[in-house]
Image: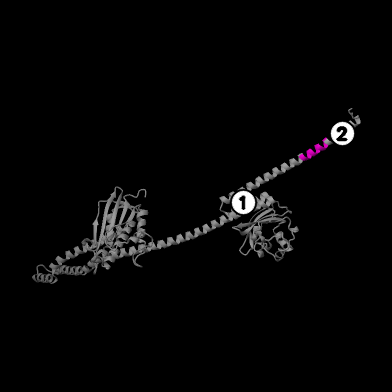
Amino acid sequence: MSYTPTPEEHSAELQKTAQLIASCSGQLLQQTKYLQDTLQAEAEAQQQLVIRRKSLLRIVSKVRQSLDFGEICQTATNEVRRILAADRVAIYRFNADWSGDFLYESAEAQWISLVESQNRNPLISKNVSECSAKLLGKVHTADTHLQKTEGGEFSHGEVFRICPDIYEAGFSDCYIEVLESYQARSYAIVAIYIKQKLWGLLAAYQNSKPRNWQEADVQLLIHIAEQLGIALKQAEYVQTIEQQSDELRRTLAELKRSQTQLIQNEKMASLGQLVAGVAHEINNPVNFIHGNLSHLGEYADDLLELVRFCEQCDVNDAASLEALKHKIAAMDLNFILADLPKIIESMKLGTERIQKIVLSLRNFSRLDEAEIKTVDVHEGIESTLLILGRRTQARGQYPGVEVIRDYGNIPAIECYPAQLNQVFMNLLANALDAIEEAHEAGKFMLLPRAEEGSPKLWIRTRLANQNQIEIHIRDNGVGITREDEGKIFDHFFTTKEVGHGTGLGLTISNQIITETHCGTLELVSSSLPGAEFAIRLPVTLEGC
């Protein structure tokens, strides 16, 4: 038999059910609100994390793109202060004695600038105090970037140190006074290392109130400090490279000055040979002219005296005519009339010789012409030979040098005549040096072949192809050893005795031919005695 509740019991049951539903609904609403709050907090945290990651990426990108450490530090302090909503973020650098300075900072407008104020306020620049040093062993939370502890715990590998409230940390009064000079109430400090060596600190300050620094805050500072360490490494590398570049620039400038001086010395040596040759060549005709001037003067005096005597002589007076005959016989007029034209002709030849030497000197130097000129190479070679003519002539026991010319039919070429003549001067002077050295060593007496048994200098020119000419200069002097063949164009290399060569003649010649004229200068390997150089030059300098 079933039980049927009374209306009163049914009503009570319904009331209990309603209460249970109301209770569950309240709990569901609370759980829903909690879930909503949790999701919102997680969303905000995720959003904040995304913002921090973007900021970190900006700083990382700045580190990788910029080599300016100051720009990187300023960007880092600005970004960190914005993300952490801190009142100040600063970068502090230790000196060698563990004192230090604030280098960079980012702060709200109402706070003082530590970078600017540290030079005026002794408390800001004060990095150590007796009282705070004494408390290091007693108060673990005490700030330890102190001069007396040489970087404190940070120098021993500690990465960060936080202080929620400087008035609750147990700091000494004098150390609080230093922190108050920073206007700081709370801080989080992270060490900046370079290759495990403490360089400085990255510090975030909350000035207006205490602050409980979160793990995410500290992690951000740690990541930024790591990037600053990388930037510092880059800055050190850049500074090292810049210093090395400065040293290289100074060294290069010094080398250029030395090279200029050595080249000038080489030019002066060539000029000395040129002057000596010209002086010798001009001296002979000048001496001849000077020696004949006295005879010419005597003849002129005698002829003038005869003219004056004739003016006073009466042609109708037999005695005057007889005196004139005696005068003519006494002065040997017939000899004067025969010798005077010869003297004048010989003096004319002497002046023509001087004129030719001056013309050759002008052709050699080309001072009155544009730098690039179309010239006859043979003319430059002959001008150089004329200047060096004294060295080819016999003197004392020296038999002289026979110059054998084998000039081909070559066109005039575009060149820098003065520089090309300097090459001829260097090569021909070196050849004559080698011949003289061989003569002093008695080499020519030992040579079996008749054509090689006396000093000789061969000069040969030919058309290599339609666009190039060749000039060969060979001597039968001491020659160049196999060991030295690869070094003859090196700077300062010379086979001559100390004081007799700078070792730059062939180097300069090679530069003139290869760099200025786009040609080649080579030492020709040969079994013949002496040395042979081959010059190959383009007919035109177009495209050079």
In the rendered image, residue 375 lying in the magenta stretch gets the answer: no
Residue at the left extreme? 318
Label 2 vs label 1: CA separation?
A: 67 Å
| Tag shown at residue 75 | 1
Q: Position of residue 464 (x, y in %)?
A: 29, 50
Residue named by callout 2: 15
Front residue of 146/72: it is: 146
Q: Position of residue 137 (x, y in %)?
A: 71, 64
Q: Where is residue 306 in the image (x, y as percent from the top left)?
A: 15, 69
* Count of numbered circles on the image: 2
Q: Is 338 placed left or right of 403 in the picture?
A: left
Tag 2 near tag 1, CB within 8 Å: no
Find residue 168 and report its image quarter: bottom right
Q: Is 326 placed left or right of 258 in the picture?
A: left
The amino acid type found where label 2 is placed reads: Gln
Colouring scheme, one of rainbow, by chain, secondary structure, one colour: one colour
The amino acid type found where label 1 is placed reads: Thr
Q: What stretch is highlighted in magenta?
A: 21-31
Q: Is 235 placed left or right of 128 in the picture?
A: left
